[in-house]
Image (cartoon, coloured by chain):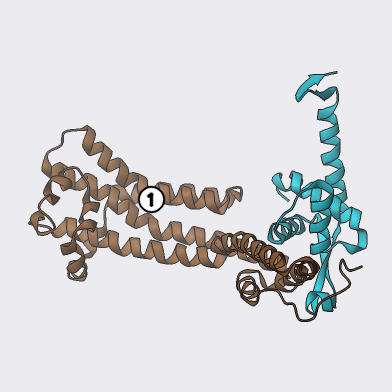
Amino acid sequence: MSEKDKFLGEFEQMTMLALLHLENEAYGAAIRQLLAEQVNRNVAIGALYSTLERLERKGMVESRLGEATAQRGGRAKRYFKVTAQGHSALKRARQAMDTLWQGLSIRHSLFQKV
Amino acid sequence: MSLYSDKKPDIKPPALANRVLSVLLPHRLVESILGDLEEEFNLRAKQSIKHANQWYWQQTLETSMIYLQKKLASVDVLGRLNFYLPLIMFVVTAGLIVLLSILNDPAFISETFWDELLQGKIHTALFSAHFWHNFWDILALAEWGMFIHFESLLISFFSIAMMICLYKQQQASLFELAISGYSLAFIPYLWSIMHIEHHSFEAKQIGPIVATGILCLLYQLPPVSYIIHRKLQQLKTEHFEFQQ
């Protein structure tokens, strides 16, 4: 894995956190809706799958095909799950952000030291 | 858990949109993406079919743009471009070299061609209808001796060695490799034009300078194309392993 692949972008982190929230029900439509409702990120399904594919290539998530339902025109769902490597990357990203946020607060749209 | 439980059986997403997506999406994702879209479409259609259709087309367009871009940048398309474009450039460059070697009357190409040749700009022949009209006849006059030039071979050798190092280090991306390779191939010719522009040479001195630049291009195009082909094959193998 290259150095660049160890880091997660903002949308990658949001997507992985959505997978963790949805647990065993993390598939395209559900993830898209959760992101739209919880963080107001109304993304195209293609953008979401593009991110999930990239995360899968990095080894951060894995996918499996699930059941087909009538609501989906008889098409199967693809379920996604965060891997152990993904968990570590998320943890690392959070620690990095926490470290950088320490001693800062936002007041009147300005970043100030506390 | 499914997001939506009821479904009006007579409402279907736009068939044309599905067709567009089926063509553009990667095979392994078609089923999942179309299923997700249909599931959400059915929920929206319960409130307004018009809005559901609009939403479906918007998703289709945005998703198509993403995957169209990926398709254009795909290994297969780049592989074909990396084969045909250098091949065409190689044949055209060979034609220019033969033209430079046999040309007695520059006015045959165009009235201004002699002045342009004196500035080292042999590529301006490409804008002449006469050049293209007689292209294969010009090429038929080629002799091996026209394509052998020691200085150009030496410059090309070093450029190709640099490319091989860059490729073997495995750190350069395909884009960086392609930009470096083709830049190295074109630089000697661009240098020859600038060199001529900044010095006052006699007419008989200009020919060898232009020949050095253009022969470097000819020598370097096939190996650069081959190195990029190797990189593309490597990416294709990695992609195939991921798909597996």
**Residue B142 in view:** no
Residue B107 shows in this picture? yes
The C terminus of chain B is located in which quarter?
bottom right
Under mark 1, the amino acid is Ala
- What chain is the brown one? B
Q: Position of residue B87 (x, y in %)?
A: 37, 65
Foreground residue among B160 and A12: A12
Q: Secondary structure at mark 1?
A: helix
B29 or B215: nearer the viewer: B29
Which residue corresponds to mark 1? B185
Chain to which the residue tagged by mark 1 belongs: B
Whether A25 is drawn above or below B209: the answer is below
Please indicate whether residue A33 sits to the left or right of residue B70 in the image.
right
Residue drawn at 12 percent across, 44 percent down: B204
Q: Residue at x 17, y 43 (%)?
A: B206
Where is residue B146, by image quadrant? Answer: bottom left
Crowding at mark 1 (Cα within 10 Å: few <14, some 14-19, many 20+): many
User: Left or right: B12 with respect to B68?
Assistant: right
Residue at (68%, 73%) from the top-left corner? Answer: B27
Residue A18 image point, x, y percent: 85, 53
What x and y, as percent, mark residue B50? 69, 67
- Residue A31, picture quadrant: bottom right
Residue A62 rendering spot, x and y as whole percentages: 82, 62
Which of the chains is cyan?
Answer: A
